[in-house]
Image (cartoon, helix red, strand yellow):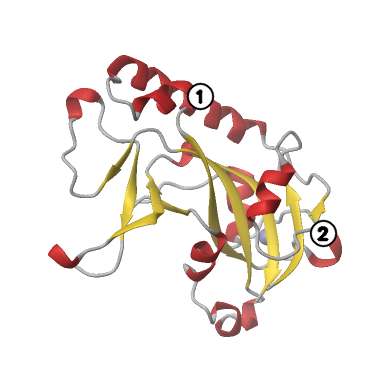
């Protein structure tokens, strides 16, 4: 895997922390964007999660939620179609189907099944079909990895009883392959239901 370019979306983050988690030799470029609105929404959401946990929290797992909303660093892979990363370009485009640029510009969109955030860059990478670049070459489709801060809040696993009285869950551990009793829990995948809970912080443009 060759890293073409990596840069931070916000300046005040710990570069080293993310760089360490990225396979390959991530080169960190200049700070590209700031999106005060998305950051403000993220912080507002964290306060809601913290307040809810403080109100309802009784168990040990609520302690992190009360402290910082249970923030985690997670990976999300997607595609883009513009010149992002080309010759060091860090400007985002306005094309409707350029999904990386869309996320950076406006944040994530709500998804019925939750926004899948992965604990490793490899898992995030394989979440996108292997041949996507080949298949959509005519549209200049490429892939990039987003390193995101995620307010996970109280994490549940599917099948676990949801207790509405104590506020329920803010995110859910994914369900892996199989069905019914054969279903394996995929603890590398965390599904987040509120788009405000995910803040993209680093973009890594890479080639396979
Ligand atoms: Zn773009």
Q: Disc 1 designates what residue?
A: 44
Residue at the image point whose x is 55% and y is 84% from the top: 135
Q: Nearer the viewer, residue 10 or 34?
A: 10
- Percent position (x, y) of residue 161? 16, 40
* Mark 2 residue element: loop
- Name which quarter of the figure residue 94 lies in: bottom right
Q: Does the residue labelled 1 lie within 8 Å of ligand 1?
A: no
**Badge 1 density bin: few <14, some 14–19, many ≥20, Cα 10 Å:** some
**Badge 2 density bin: few <14, some 14–19, many ≥20, Cα 10 Å:** few
* Marked residue nearer the N-terminal end (2 or 1): 1
Q: In this image, 82 relative to 175: left or right?
A: right
Q: Quadrant of the N terminus?
A: bottom right
Say above or below: 104 vs 83: above
Say above or below: 207 vs 114: below
Residue at the image point whose x is 61% and y is 54% from the top: 146
Residue at the image point whose x is 54% and y is 54% from the top: 75
Ligand 1 quarter of the rendering = bottom right
Q: In this image, 26 relative to 130: left or right?
A: right
Number of numbered discs overlaid on the protein picture? 2
Q: Disc 2 to disc 1, how far (Cα)?
A: 31 Å
Q: Is mark 2 within 8 Å of ligand 1?
A: no
Give the residue at the far front of this rendering. Answer: 60
Q: Disc 2 designates what residue?
A: 89
* Mark 1 residue element: helix
- Percent position (x, y) of residue 169? 29, 35
- Percent position (x, y) of residue 205? 70, 63
Give the residue at the far left of this rendering. Answer: 181
Q: In which quarter of the image is the C terminus?
A: bottom right
């Amino acid at each position: 895997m060759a890293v073409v370019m990596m840069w931070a979306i916000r300046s005040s983050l710990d570069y080293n922390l993310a760089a360490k988690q990225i396979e390959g030799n991530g080169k960190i470029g200049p700070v590209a964007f700031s999106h005060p609105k998305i950051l403000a929404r993220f912080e507002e959401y964290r306060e809601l999660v913290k307040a809810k946990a403080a109100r309802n929290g009784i168990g040990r797992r609520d302690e992190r939620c009360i402290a910082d909303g249970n923030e985690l660093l997670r990976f999300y892979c997607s595609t883009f179609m513009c010149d992002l990363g080309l010759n060091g370009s860090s400007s985002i485009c306005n094309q409707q189907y350029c999904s990386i640029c869309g996320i950076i510009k406006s944040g994530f969109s709500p998804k019925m099944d939750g926004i899948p955030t992965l604990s490793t860059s490899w898992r995030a990478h394989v979440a996108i079909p292997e041949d996507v670049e080949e298949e959509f070459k005519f549209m200049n489709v490429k892939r990039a990895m987003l390193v995101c801060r995620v307010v996970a809040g109280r994490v549940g696993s599917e099948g676990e009883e949801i207790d509405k009285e104590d506020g329920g869950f803010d995110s859910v551990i994914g369900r892996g392959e199989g069905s019914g009793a054969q279903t394996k829990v995929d603890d590398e995948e965390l599904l987040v239901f509120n788009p405000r809970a995910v803040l993209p912080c680093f973009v890594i443009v890479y080639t396979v």
